[in-house]
Amino acid sequence: MSQAASPCRIAVVGAGVVGMTTALALQRRGHRVTVLDPRAPGEGASYGNAGFLATELIDPLSTPALLRKVPRLWLDPHGAVALPYRYLPRLTPWLMRFIAAARPAQVAKGRQALAALNGEAVAAWQRCLAEIGAEEELLASGYLLVWESKRGRAAARVQMAHLQCWGHAVEWLEAAEIRAREPGLSGRLSHGLYFPGAHQVRDPYALVRCLAAAFEARGGVIRQTKVERIEPRGEGVRLHTDAGELEADRTVVAAGAWSHHLTKSLGLEVPLETERGYHLTLPERGQALRQPVGSAERRCVMTPMSCGLRVVGFTELGGLSLSPRARRYTSLRHHAGALLADGRGLDDTAEEWMGFRPTLPDSLPVIDTHPTCPAIHFAFGHQHLGLTQAAITAELVTALVMSEKPTLDLAPYRVTRFSRRWKTE
Ligand SMILES: Cc1cc2nc3c(=O)[nH]c(=O)nc-3n(C[C@H](O)[C@H](O)[C@H](O)COP(=O)(O)OP(=O)(O)OC[C@H]3O[C@@H](n4cnc5c(N)ncnc54)[C@H](O)[C@@H]3O)c2cc1C
């Protein structure tokens, strides 16, 4: 029997949705699990996302079509892409890799790998939540993607055919059908796509807190501590934290957009960038829509949640330290005001938030074991899909810890895929 098949001490670094689903999955297999995070569970990117299981996002972010659109999205004052000038010099190496990832062969591989994770995502969430008796956190909501301009009809047709080829149920809606399905939208619509099989969560922050409560109720430990460095020690690891050292038999790095700080000291260069995303939450407007609604042209999503109506958007490649830009909230108000039939709550009573999507140039996460230290595992880099893919990631990384055969081929998610040193060895 391998060491991890018998109960052992496991330290999970990061208490976001990926860390907490992983901690629960490992605990379920009989391990003694400690989660370390300087913040309380769910206070990173997992706090403020759109709460939508975006299983239809099977295309990598870097494609020739997207690269052609970037200048327009960047120059539009309300456009969805922002590249702060101050950050450009630091961003350039990542950007070069991102552009290189748009090669057709790489896009095809990436699509296969994203579709594989997304295809298992909902079932994995159902298993995770059923196991802790929290099924009500996941809602079979459906999803509506709308266009305001008739010019987008051809693009919508292409997208529908593409997703149907990949097994997604998609229905075409004309403006009147959209209005019947979603009376909360304004009248200025042309057409849309409806995804009847889509799911959302009730509230992503409440979800992580619920996972954390179940974990602690079963004896799991959450320590409010920052991990400074991970040191391989014999067959296990020593975690150096800002509150002393912790010995463990295994560790899983699930520190979202900060994970590369920890991989670096382990000899692994991982080009992790942050896609800063923004939200407004309108606390009194949780009933404003019947289902999550995305705007294809404005590139924003509005999701009705138990905490209110959430409006989410922007890809701002700006790293971890720049402060949030106030004008992004103005743009979110501008978009939501144009899309909603009733714009109440878009004033200063709306909560404003910015968070860090952890993104690698090929849009795939890392789900892997360290190439030379079998006690160190990784689960990070889920870009726009961390909520969607958290539960399946937890199952896959648990298989690695248990030395079992994972249910998916994990080769596309290797931690060494960007490193010349490991590729040539
Ligand atoms: C605006 C926005 C909208 C989004 N919408 C969606 C959506 O609808 N659907 C979807 O699937 N995804 C969505 N995402 C993406 C999703 O939120 C993220 O991919 C996901 O939350 C990442 O989870 P995580 O656990 O990896 O990271 P996080 O939630 O960021 O958690 C990482 C944790 O690690 C901790 N940490 C960092 N460094 C250390 C350290 N040294 N020691 C200990 N702990 C550490 C942090 O404090 C943090 O709590 C969205 C993201 C944003 C920003």
Image (tube, rainbow, N blue to C red):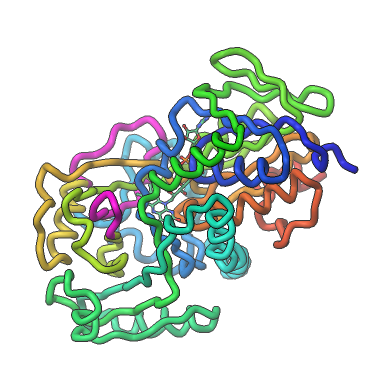
Tell me the quarter of the picture where residue 371 sits.
top right
Tell me the quarter of the picture where residue 144 sits.
bottom left
Q: Is residue 62 above or below residue 241?
A: below
Task: Determine the residue positioned at 37% across, 37% down.
Answer: 87
Task: Determine the residue positioned at 32% across, 59% down.
Answer: 71
Magenta span contains residue 154? no
Taking the image as shown, residue 271 lies to the left or right of residue 149, namely right
Q: Residue furthest top?
A: 244
Q: Nearer the viewer, residue 354 or 340?
A: 340
Report if residue 92 is visible in the image. no
Q: Is residue 345 above or below residue 377?
A: below
Q: What range of the chain is rendered magenta?
A: 304-328
Taking the image as shown, residue 270 lies to the left or right of residue 414, namely left
- Give how far across and how far down residue 43 sits, in percent: 40, 36
- Give how far across and how far down residue 352 sits, in percent: 23, 42
- Give how far across and how far down residue 23 sits, in percent: 61, 40
